[in-house]
Amino acid sequence: MPDVFTTEKRSQVMSRIRASGNKSTELALIRFFRQNHLTGWRRHQDIYGKPDFVFRSVHLAVFVDGCFWHGCTDHCKVPDNNRDFWENKLRANKARDRKVTSTLRANRWHVLRIWEHDLKSGRHANLLRRFRRFLNTH
């Protein structure tokens, strides 16, 4: 179905929508932390790049990247409608992710990026190994 708005009007409407975070994936990671007794994390910390979770004691910034918005090669399907826009948008998101990661690392932060699909229950053992490996060595 074609858009009912002009390109300019659609842009204006979309610009007024404010991000509300990736609440469902963040809540899934909180459940994962609690189920596996991983402590020391905080949310909403004033750190460059706005990580979803921060373990300040070990300088670890954790990002939960949604498969669509961050361009997961396994699960991101670029919409056919307005394809050029979406390809540019996803490319810019990936470039921003790389910049955030490199900036944090330059400031002595460790960065752990978790894909949304890593939070599915069948993948918890691998995710737990990643966290424990990091937390035990730092």
Image: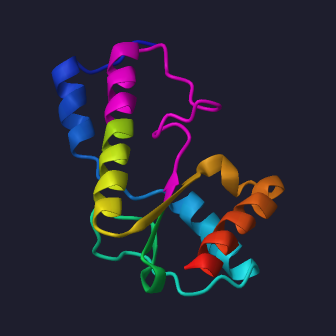
Query: As rendered, which of 18 and 53 lies closer to the eye?
Result: 53
- Is 74 covered by the magenta stretch? yes
Query: As rendered, which of 82 and 118 lies closer to the eye?
Result: 118
Query: As rendered, which of 115 and 56 lies closer to the eye?
Result: 56
Q: Position of residue 13 (x, y in %)?
A: 23, 36
Inspect this view and state whether residue 82 appears.
Answer: no
The number of numbered badges drawn on the structure is: 0
Quarter of image, res 98: top left
Instruction: Say left or right for 125 vs 86.
Output: right
User: Compared to 137, does 8 lie above or below?
Assistant: above
Q: Which residues are magenta?
A: 63-92
User: Compared to 52, does 64 lie above or below?
Assistant: above
Q: Residue at x 37, y 46 (%)?
A: 97
Furthest toward the front, the residue is 137
Q: Position of residue 80 (x, y in %)?
A: 48, 13
- Indicate the quadrant containing the C terminus: top left, top right, bottom left or bottom right: bottom right
Inspect this view and state whether residue 85 appears.
Answer: yes
Q: Position of residue 137 (x, y in %)?
A: 61, 77
